[in-house]
Image (cartoon, rainbow, N blue to C red):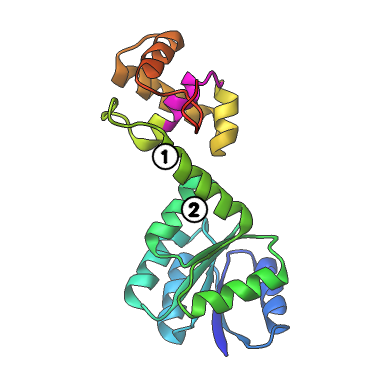
Amino acid sequence: MVSVLVVDDHPVVRSGIRALLSSLDGIEVCGEADSGESALREAHLLKPDVVIMDVHMPGGDGIEATRRICSALPNTAVLVLTMFEDQATVLAALEAGARGYLLKGAGQDEIEHALHAAAVGETVFGPSIAKQLLDAAVGTKRVPAAAFPQLTPRELQILDRIARGDGNAAIARSFEVANKTVSNHISAIFAKLRVATRAEAIVLARDNGLGRTASGEP
């Protein structure tokens, strides 16, 4: 029997998750919490096998709660269940120690599998999250970093996309961030590279091997 603590700030969502889990064999909901702080208290009190954790909640962030639970209760796994699928949130959750990441809207079978997998120490991701992480890993490996050590990994990826001719909107869609976020990154890139225009940045980037496809062709 896998004991589960459900953490979400919306009562209707918690009720829905509890109802879903109650219908599954081998799953027992042992408690609920509506914030990161209450999740910590309940986790220490109940010591569940798995905590289903939302990310952005008032009264205590789910990422910080995940970090503290994973640190204090190594036998309790945290499975993130949220609507947020931006790369920064996913990576923050994994760095905090989450053992899985699913999006709200995941099917019953997917959630059931993820809970049992997390309880025995496996790591599990929803299909779109797994693809996003794979794309990010491949993209990071493909972009040569030696020529621009002053840039962060994300800035390097954005410079690569600029060198390929992508506009800000396309880059924002690719990384699932706001256009303003991309604009801020580009301003930082231009300042670090001491260039004033997009054209200058493209020439510099392509001269150093960026802006090419995975096969290495222009």
Residue placed under numbered mark 2 in the picture: 90
Quadrant including the N terminus = bottom right
SS for callout 1: helix
- Amino acid type at circle 1 is Thr
122 and 18: which is toward the camera: 122
Q: Residues within 10 Å of mark 1 (few under 14, many from 20)?
A: some
Which image quarter: residue 202?
top left
Q: Residues within 10 Å of mark 2 (few under 14, many from 20)?
A: many
Q: Which residue is drawn at the image coordinates 71% and 71% (left, top)?
A: 108
> Is 76 placed above or below 203 here?
below
Residue drawn at (67%, 77%), measured in percent from left and top?
18
Per the rendering, the mark at residue 203 is: none
The picture places residue 118, in percent across and down from the top left corner, at 51, 74
Which of these two is toward me, 136 or 90? 136
Q: Earlier in the sequence, mark 1 or mark 2?
A: 2
Q: Is residue 92 visible?
A: yes
Q: Quadrant of residue 169?
A: top right
Q: Residue at x 49, y 82 (%)?
A: 49
The amino acid pointed to by label 2 is Val
- Quick one: 99 or 38, which is closer to the camera? 99
Residue on which disc 1 sits? 140
Magenta span = 157-166
Residue 85: x and y, percent?
Answer: 57, 50
Question: Is residue 183 shown in magenta?
Answer: no
| Secondary structure mostly seen in the magenta stretch | helix
Counting from the top left corner in percent of width and height, residue 113 is at 62, 74
- Compared to 6, does 96 lie above or below? above
In magenta segment, residue 165: yes
Residue at 36% across, 24% down: 188
Q: Is residue 144 above or below residue 11?
A: above
